Image: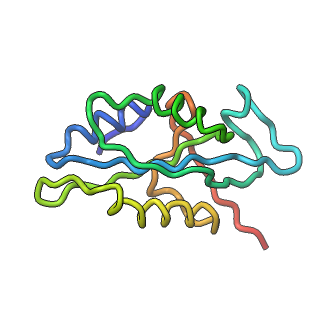
Amino acid sequence: MIRISSFDDLKRAGLEQGEPQRLLLVLLKAEPEGEAKHHNGGEAIEGGGTLRPVMATDRELDEDLRLDALVEEADQSGLSWDLILVSSLSASGGRLPTSEEAEPYLKQMAEAVEMGADLSRYAVFDRAGSPVQLQTRMTE
């Protein structure tokens, strides 16, 4: 079992796979409820709140992929975001999936966030690349 303690760990693990990978990235805005507390300019939220997808994209996983470059690119979009939800698509027969092939999976990820589904199968990082543990709270 691989321990992922940063975005760079995830990148390294993906690069060690036998097949090329395409990363699927969904940027999330954390919207606190009630007395939720913000820390470090909104990088982490304690207490209740909801997540809202604000942008989805994909990137080929290679040595040159850097989180700081992804953050800068995302910030240039003008959208406000706090967390990044990450998954990957593996190549089939050595052929990297295209962005068009990744699109339904990105949509599925965004819909899972909107529906409040269990996101434990995805990696979640803050803007600095530190992992974030999400807890789903059932509402009555």
In what quadrant of the picture does the C terminus appear?
A: bottom right
Relative vertical location of residue 113 with respect to residue 45 in this rendering, above or below: below
Q: Quadrant of residue 97?
A: bottom left
Q: Is residue 72 left or right of residue 89?
A: right
Task: Report the residue that reaches farthest toward the right.
Answer: 34
What is the number of callouts on the image? 0
Q: Where is residue 103 drawn, in percent x and y?
A: 41, 62
Q: Colour mode?
A: rainbow
Residue in the image at 30% along x and 28% along y: 64
Q: Is residue 65 left or right of residue 71?
A: left
Task: Name the foreground residue: 26 vs 39.
Answer: 26
Q: Which quadrant holds residue 102? A: bottom left
- Residue at position x 60%, y 60% in the image: 113
Which of the image's four quarters has the N terminus?
top left
| Residue reaching furthest to the left | 93
On screen, residue 36 above or below 65: below
The residue that appears at 48% across and 66% down in the rendered structure is 108
